[in-house]
């Protein structure tokens, strides 16, 4: 099986094979033309050992068999067999890898028979007239030495392959970990952006609702009660200025994660109610029970739900009717109820045209571990109910 390797690696293998051939050439010249031919075959096997380990093994076998058939002596070029066996284990496929191991075993047997039997037999009867036990010992030693060096070369390639595979696995795990961390980071960023978008919606929608209500009041009072118009304009300026500051902080948070952002808490509810009342909406606020300690995130959830509920009352409710806001505290948290009269042309409680609003309030309640329900009753009233559990403040 051909392995895709870079042109630089193939060029390197060819150059190294050429150097090997030049080193072995003087010894091959001493043996004659056949040894030079066999040297060329082994050099070719080395040149393609990483490009195609299977073909390299086949070419090496051709060289080895040619050497034995021509009854040539051992030469320096036989070292090329070690490089070929190494490459079958290090770079070959599954089949070529095990063919390399089988070749090491078969090659050891053939080399032993060639050196211990064939060569002495060709050398003459005198070479075979030695002690049989001694010949058996020499044959065994040749076999052990042959299989040891051949299998050692193959094992070295296998170890290198294992190290390379382990590095590849580690690299893939590292890439997978980076991709997972990137996905988690993107998820966190998306969640943070959604939170900022909800805050932006709450700030802008509430402020615009107050500004619109005050502007309408100032327009009608401009001729008959100029002082009321002046007060309304002052309220508009104050609300717009505060909203502008909040929007700047939110935009700064989008650019710089470390920057501060508006974090309203329960103590800011009074200022919120004053803004709404100044916009012309009567709010009847009642609070029962003792406040338990709430975490900052839970306080923000309560504040934003009240803010969005009052904003919806300004935008979609009958502003001539009072709004009832009740906070019932117990050890488990707070029960929030907001009831306002609806206009006849007001949209449903969850219009699909809006991305935030009531869905945003419900998400805030769920993130705080609570629940939220919004429904338009048959009595012409809009009921908003939320339950936010208590959470102790962190002592860190």
Image (cartoon, rainbow, N blue to C red):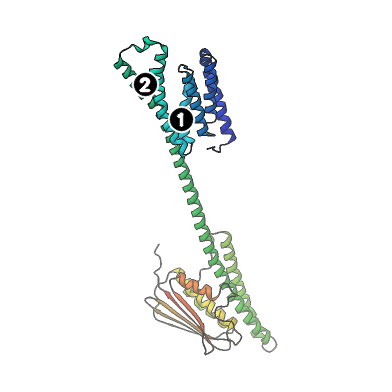
Q: Nearer the viewer, residue 170 or 129?
A: 129
The quadrant holding residue 97 is top left
Asked which secondary structure carries label 1, the reply is: helix
Q: Position of residue 188 (x, y in %)?
A: 51, 60
- Name which residue lies at 48% across and 23% down: 65
* Residues packed near mark 1 inside 10 Å, few (<14), some (14 to 19) or many (20 plus): many
Asked which secondary structure carries label 2, the reply is: helix
Q: Is residue 58 placed above or below 130 in the rendered structure?
A: below
Q: Residue furthest left?
A: 133
Mark 1 and 2 residues: CB-CB less than 8 Å, in contact?
A: no
Pick whichever of labels 1 and 2 is earlier in the sequence: 1
Q: Position of residue 338 (x, y in %)?
A: 49, 82
Report which residue position mark 2 lands on.
Answer: 142
Q: Position of residue 90 (x, y in %)?
A: 47, 35
Q: Is residue 152 visible?
A: no
Q: Is residue 104 placed above or below 184 in the rendered structure?
A: above
Q: Is residue 265 placed above or below 61 in the rendered structure?
A: below
Q: Nearer the viewer, residue 355 or 322?
A: 355
Q: Is residue 54 placed above or below 195 in the rendered structure?
A: above
The quadrant holding residue 311 is bottom right
Tag shown at residue 85 = 1
């Amino acid at each position: 099986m051909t392995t895709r390797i870079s042109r630089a690696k193939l060029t390197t293998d060819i150059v190294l094979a050429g150097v090997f051939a030049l080193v072995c050439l003087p010894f091959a010249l001493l043996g004659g033309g056949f040894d030079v031919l066999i040297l060329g075959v082994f050099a070719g096997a080395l040149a393609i050992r990483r490009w195609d380990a299977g073909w390299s093994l086949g070419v090496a076998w051709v060289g080895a068999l040619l050497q034995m058939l021509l009854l040539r002596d051992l030469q320096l070029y036989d070292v090329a067999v070690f490089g070929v066996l190494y490459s079958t284990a290090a770079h070959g496929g599954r089949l070529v890898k095990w063919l390399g191991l089988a070749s090491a075993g078969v090659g050891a047997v053939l080399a032993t028979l060639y050196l211990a039997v064939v060569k002495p037999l060709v050398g003459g009867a005198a070479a075979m007239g030695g002690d049989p036990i001694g010949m058996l010992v020499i044959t065994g030693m040749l076999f052990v030495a042959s299989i040891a060096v051949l299998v050692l070369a193959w094992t070295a390639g296998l170890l290198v392959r294992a190290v390379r595979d382990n590095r590849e696995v580690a690299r893939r795990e590292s890439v997978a970990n980076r991709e997972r961390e990137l996905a988690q980071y993107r998820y966190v960023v998306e969640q943070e952006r959604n939170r900022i978008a909800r805050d932006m919606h709450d700030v802008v929608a509430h402020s615009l609702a107050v500004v619109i209500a005050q502007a309408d009041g100032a327009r009608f009072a401009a001729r008959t009660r100029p002082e009321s118009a002046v007060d309304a304009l002052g309220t508009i300026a104050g609300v717009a200025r505060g909203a502008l500051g909040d929007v700047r902080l939110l935009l700064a948070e989008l650019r710089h994660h470390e920057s501060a952002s508006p974090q309203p808490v329960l103590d800011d509810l009074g200022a919120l109610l004053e803004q709404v009342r100044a916009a012309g909406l009567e709010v009847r606020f009642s609070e029962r029970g003792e406040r338990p300690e709430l975490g900052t995130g839970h306080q923000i959830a309560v504040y934003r739900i009240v803010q969005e509920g009052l904003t919806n009352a300004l935008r979609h409710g009958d502003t001539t009717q009072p709004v009832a806001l009740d906070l019932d505290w117990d050890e488990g948290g707070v029960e929030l109820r907001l009831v306002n009269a609806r206009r006849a042309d007001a949209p449903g409680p969850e219009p699909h045209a809006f991305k935030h609003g009531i869905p945003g309030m419900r998400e805030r309640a769920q993130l705080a571990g609570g629940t939220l329900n919004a429904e338009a009753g048959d009595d012409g009233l809009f009921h908003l109910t939320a339950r936010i559990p208590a959470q102790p403040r962190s002592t860190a």
